[in-house]
Image: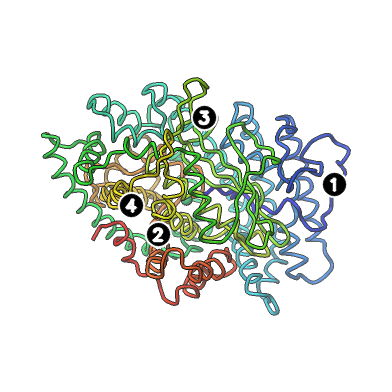
Amino acid sequence: MIMKLSLYIAGPVAGLAVIMTACNTNTNIFLQEWDTPYGTAPFSKISQEDYLPAFREGIKEEKANVQAIIDCKDAPTFENTILALENSSPILDKVTGVFFNLSESDSTPQMQAIEEEILPELTAASNEIYMNPDLFARVKAVYENQEGLTREQQMVVKKVYQGFERNGVGLEGEAKARFAEISTRLASLSQKFGQNLLAENNAFKEATGITVSEYYDFMGSCPDREKRKAVFEAYSTRGNHGNEFDNNAVVLEALKLRAEMAQLLGYPSFAAFQLSDKMAGSSETVDAFLQPIMDASMRKAKADMKEMAKLAGHKIEAWDYSYYAEKLRAQKYALDESQTKPYFQADSVLKGVFTAAEMIYGIKIEPAPEVEVYNPAASAYKLTDADGSLIGIFYKDYYVRDTKRGGAWMNNFREQKTGVRPIIVNVCNFPAPGEDPTDAQPSLLTIDNVQTAFHEFGHALHGFLSQCNYVTVSGTSVARDFVETFSQFNENFAFVPEILAVYAKDYRTGEPIPAELVAKIRKGLSFNQGFMCGELCAASILDMKWHELSASELEAFNGPDDIRAFEAKVCKEMGLIDEIIPRYRTTYFNHIMGSGYSAGYYGYLWSEVLSDDAWEKFLADGVFNKATADGFRKTFLERGGSEEPMVLYKSWRGADPDPAALTRARGLE
Ligand SMILES: [Zn+2]
């Protein structure tokens, strides 16, 4: 997953000349220059009391800078309007970069309170900018006369222009006021959803003794059927318990407001609005893309289930699926994860992740003990290029803790642009190593965890290797249905023999993983794809179907029962079998409620076509073929959103991607 602070176009920390408001005498850390290695945040000097005043000072500064753009007497140009806007909020960039990272990965009740207080103010400030007709007039003037602009500048202008349009700048009177009201409320609802889910995830752990991120591992390995059923029920009803953390009302209000917002902008549904600036273009295209993948997945799942029922001697229920899938995997490939885990100690896996990037792209990654970290469990690294130049600073924060939201993600503390290298974090929820030094349990990863580590670092590489001039289009600032391309592509390197040889060593003896075990892992990768691809595809369709509803259709929805009934209907229509549920159900679907994948979860599968097709070329040319990797990096990976994704892809690949690459890669045909 990738996290984006999507409230506004976040600029870099080190901006161009900007108007500074008079607050340098203040002791607030966010209002001072950071005299730190590479301009990284001085976490130990940050006090929670610094956040709110810094946010407010930042909003003031941004307002003044934006006013200066509006008041500019010169004719609008890229520099005095678009670029000036990108650089209008240095303080906000600094404080949001830190705060919204930590509020996800190392939150406290105090931070949650700050978040609740500041979000409406931030949204209001952002609305004031993006709904300002005078500012938009200048942006529009640049948009309408792009003579002399580079292709990258044109892409920046287009994105900024669309940003205004999509933020309702064209609205007037009541509609305009309503739009602003809706976006403020939506930001709060999204926050509320995440906070409820964090509480529900912690309650799940209390009730079951396992964390949410251990769920799949548990379901695949627990022999006690009753216990599995209880865990399945607790997991699949999160946010749906009718208690203070119930998310039904939050979801329903958000869906209705999104549909209303889209309608105000002239779109029939939120899906139509969301898709209008994506690669796929329309929700009909997405529906037509997903259904065949769903059908292929269900064919495979049904075939697998027949074999599983034979093994079980009874009908397979939803809480049996993963357990007997693992039994079947063990039978077919003689592989169970207790054999592989000792080779996947978290620190070694990280070494593998780094080595793969070093081998493919010719870069170097080394510890950076001089860089401060925000939590003792995190660590910092420095990336340099073959010529010794700095690529960026990386924080790794792998282990589960109560202050961390569930899941795994990449985020920026600072984004790349001319003269500024990025600072990027990967946050995961892998099992934490034991603390008792006399009996320290290492953190041993599942095969899925290993893939996650490579996935998130793929996002990091997209940010790190970026060679763009403007943050608006640099690194991962690309369309949602393109952004999962490099992350999924990077997963391919996890089980390449040359990389495994580097990192997959028994933590007790240092023995390398036996070749026959590697062969089993590789064969097993396409196993259970009926389930895995099926639940992913089901969640993608569920997301799309919710957001294809118009405001008037949503009027008929009044409460939890309506939400459950719709979810059941959608699952039936897509052909999802009862034994599989969507990877996320509505009340715990944080991607679409809390983090910007609304009507966009399909983007994983959509991007996967590009990543699978790219991988076929790597396989054909030799995985470590330098010319292939260099071309991939220079013409595709480094280019961010400086050109349309498909243009970039074809300039490297020389052809359109083959959609069937996905079903081939997943062994579904
Ligand atoms: Zn991702």
Pick the front one: 593 or 649:
649
Which of the two discs, 1 and 4, labels the residue nearer the N terminus?
A: 1
- Give the amino acid at mark 4: Cys
Q: Residue 626: where, in percent of width, then height?
A: 50, 68
Is the C-beta of the residue carrying label 3 under 8 Å from the nearest atom of ligand 1? no
Quickly name the residue at label 2: 608
Which of the two discs, 3 and 2, labels the residue nearer the N terminus?
A: 3
Crowdedness near tag 1: few (<14), some (14–19) or many (≥20) residues, C-alpha within 10 Å: some
Q: Which mark is residue 21?
A: 1
Q: Can you tell which of label 2 and label 4 is closer to the viewer?
A: 2
For the residues labelled 3 and 4, say whether their Cβ atoms are less than 8 Å apart. Answer: no
Crowdedness near tag 2: few (<14), some (14–19) or many (≥20) residues, C-alpha within 10 Å: many
Q: Can you tell which of label 1 and label 2 is closer to the viewer?
A: 2
- Give the amino acid at mark 2: Glu
Quickly name the residue at label 4: 537
Q: Residue 391: where, in percent of width, then height?
A: 65, 56
Is the C-beta of the residue carrying label 1 under 8 Å from the nearest atom of ligand 1? no
Quickly name the residue at label 3: 401
- Dividing the picture into quarters, in which one does residue 378 lie? top right
Name the quadrant of the C terminus.
bottom left
Distance of label 2 from label 4 (alpha carbons): 12 Å
Q: Residue at x 61, y 34 (%)?
A: 116
Distance of label 1 from label 2 (alpha carbons): 46 Å
For the residues labelled 2 and 4, say whether their Cβ atoms are less than 8 Å apart. Answer: no
Q: Residue 205: where, in percent of width, then height?
A: 41, 25
Which of the two discs, 3 and 4, labels the residue nearer the N terminus?
A: 3
Q: How many marks?
A: 4
